[in-house]
Amino acid sequence: MGDDGAAVLARPGRRRHHEPDAEVRLILDAALVVMRRNSYAAASVADILDEAQLSTRAFYRHFDSKDALLRAMYRRDAESVARQLRTATEAAPDPVSALQAWIDGYLGVFFDPRKAQRSAVMTSEGTRRAAGYHEEQERAGTALMAPLVDVLSDGMRAGVFRSTAPERDAATIYAVASSVGAARRPGAKRLDLDAARAHVKRFCWPALGLVVEVPDGHAHAAGRETATGREAATGPETATGRDAAAGPETATGPNR
């Protein structure tokens, strides 16, 4: 019996032609194709195996349910994005550039067409009801924020950012960026990437003591040191000004 209550018919066993890692990859890739086409709720294990050209035995060698398969898909995508964010931030020449690189990379999850399609599958209504979904979502959020925490910590030590609580500040920036990503969903106000980036900077730059360029060509500064090295006179506080940050949406899913 499958996760959705439907019987899973035994498929003829086939001789294994793939190494275990390759077999898992085939199943994950096939599942994404089928879930895009049919939705998560309507995607059956049999459909996924037909797409992968694998046997029922191959599926159950690696997953005990369709929900377990979804969790593996979610984790693979989150870890891939986290690696890309880490690479981009570590390649940046200074803390402000690294912060911009993280924001651009994370917004890409919602604005890059290929990534947005994957994200839409992972955040659909049906997937949110899968067993273990919210735990996987928490795990993804932690992985995605880790490079950002390091960026804020480095910037604080260098005197560039006014951030005395990098983990809380990272959670807030993550929440703001995720809210912009949510606006890409049907029924929400549509933003392009430039508008989304400007929205995130408008909220986060002043809290970190950085200059925000506004459409009239003027620069608004707040904080001890700005992105251009100017000084402004305000005392240290966190990016939120509070002790708690709101729970954000993950790169591949909604609320943490």
Image: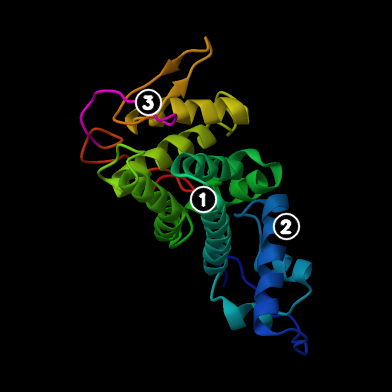
Q: Position of residue 67 (x, y in %)?
A: 53, 65
Q: Which mark is residue 230?
A: 3
Q: CA distance from mark 2 to mark 1?
A: 31 Å
The numbered mark, 2 or 1, whose residue comes first in the sequence reads 2
Residue receiving disc 2: 33
Residue 32 is left or right of residue 88, and the answer is right
Q: Amino acid at mark 2?
A: Val
Dominant secondary structure, magenta? loop
Q: CA distance from mark 3 to mark 2?
A: 51 Å
Query: Quick one: SS at disc 1?
Result: helix
The numbered mark, 1 or 3, whose residue comes first in the sequence reads 1
Q: Which mark is residue 89?
A: 1
Residue at image coords 77%, 90%: 15
Q: Amino acid at mark 3?
A: Arg
Residue 151 covered by magenta stretch = no
The magenta span reads 227-237
The numbered mark, 3 or 2, whose residue comes first in the sequence reads 2
Marks counted in the figure total 3
